[in-house]
Amino acid sequence: MNQSYWAYVNPSTVPNIVTEAVPGPQSVALNARGMAHMIGYSGQVKLCPVVFEKGHGVTLTDVDGNTYIDFSSGIYVTTLGHCHPKVSEAVAEQAKTLMNCHDFNTPIKVALLEKLAEVQPWDLTGMQLYDSGTTAVEAGIRVARAATGKCEFLSCFMDFHGKTGHAVSLGKMNSTNGAGRAQGFYVVPRPYPYRPMFTKVDGSIDTDAYINFYAEFIEYATTQQVAAFVLEPVQGWAGSIFPPDDFFPKLRTFCDERGILLMADEVLTSMGRTGKFFCMEHYNTAPDIVTVGKGFGNGFPVTGMLVSEKYKESIEAISASTSYGGNPMACAAALASIVAIEEEGLLDHALKLGEYFELRMGQMKAAHPIVGDVRVKGCLCGIELVKDRETKEPFAEAGKAVYQRAFRKGLAWVPAGHILRMSPPIVMSEEIAARGMDIIEEAIAEVEAEQGY
């Protein structure tokens, strides 16, 4: 079955901006009403505060009738496009049948657990279902403690793992929030090929040096009671940063030698985003604990934690159940999403789209001096803007300007300072992907001209 049969849109018809300015007048009015009550909107909203009314497949339409190509997927969430019919129908059916029965099994829940066990490529046989990525991460932390009897954690600078207590302590923290990192949580550098901290004589990134740094850090900076090393396979919030291919296999060995669990936070990267059900498959590395979310339910709030056979009984020790986790509607959304990925050949399609993005972004890098680096894995992409390719000085002003210009031209996407992030739905056609990339390149060229490049 054609992967985009239901989501097809004529490339000549999108984007379609009908107002003189973006945001349009109705968006401005409604946004003002919302902001009179709700505080704490994301940077994405603040940079271009449109008010969306509906979405279909790979497009979004705002209250003023402007239609945008979606390169955001609700920030990595609607991986299968907006309102995928299989998912929408499955949720609607369960909403009419049974909405919640705490953590009792239901037919749809059992079917989801069996399907999830089928698509995971390792021995992750212990599972729990939740309603947010943060909750799943917090559960993984507690499982690691229960499984090892240890209390400390390593994670990496600029990783993002959630917005509650310990999840916040695993990643970048807001220095103005009045609280420090929780005791026993330590952050260390991770390999960043474009900006390496450790290099070999030939200038290439030295992955072994990072591993050696971790060993010394544990010895001298911790009480050597590290329960788990928690990482995103690809840093999303930090700007689509991919580690070298040899990093995770070496980290797996490092953890095994020290009795440390390896926890992969795949809330952002799982369920087809990178062309695999799990991003860690690209690195041929089996984690002990995995969290999934975002695209897991294609917009419905459902997440999960998977634990290896060896440690799964530790789930019993953490009072793992939740009020909303695994409710029938959530299970229906997640099961329908996995089935759609399989039946519509979307993993292969995501990889093919990734090949197109890699080619096109490589051409953009060659043509535009402010493009310092480009990164792609499936439908997870990033463009890093710099003032000078030799110094690699980040060009945050250009990042903001390119983001806003492209949005006003009809591209809904994800900002990250000087790094432009893209997470288009994996049902997107190459023709629509090309239209989106045209808009980005136009915006980059305009900003370069303004800056005198």
Image (tube, rainbow, N blue to C red):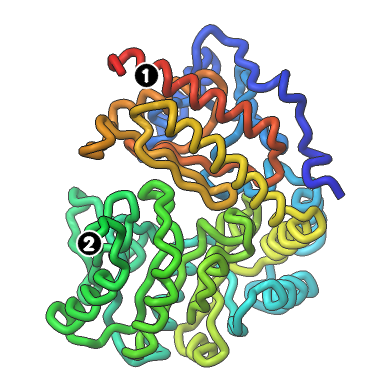
Give neighbour class at mark 1: few <14, some 14-19, many 20+ (Cα, 10 Å): some
> Farthest top residue?
20
- Whichever of labels 2 and 1 marks the residue nearer the N terminus, that label is 2
- Cα–Cα span, label 2 and label 1: 36 Å
Residue indicated by mark 1: 447
Q: Quadrant of the C terminus?
A: top left
Picture coordinates of residue 152 (x, y %)?
Answer: 27, 80
Give neighbour class at mark 2: few <14, some 14-19, many 20+ (Cα, 10 Å): few
Number of numbered discs visible in the structure rendering: 2
x 58%, y 55%: residue: 274
x 69%, y 48%: residue: 80
Left or right side of 289 for 175: left
Q: Amino acid at mark 2?
A: Val
Residue 188 vertical position relative to residue 127 in the rendered view, above or below: above
Picture coordinates of residue 69 (x, y %)?
Answer: 62, 29
Viewer-proximal residue, 318 or 236?
236
Left or right side of 184 for 377: right
Viewer-proximal residue, 186 or 361?
361
Residue 405 vertical position relative to residue 237 in the rendered view, above or below: above
Regarding residue 223, the answer to whether it shows in the image is yes
Q: Quadrant of residue 424?
A: top right
User: Which circle marks residue 201 in the picture?
Assistant: 2
Q: Amino acid at mark 1?
A: Val
Left or right side of 177 for 22: right
x 33%, y 26%: residue: 398
Disc 2 element? loop
Left or right side of 333 for 150: left
User: Which circle marks residue 162 in the picture?
Assistant: none
Regarding residue 36, the answer to whether it shows in the image is no
Q: Quadrant of residue 73?
A: top right
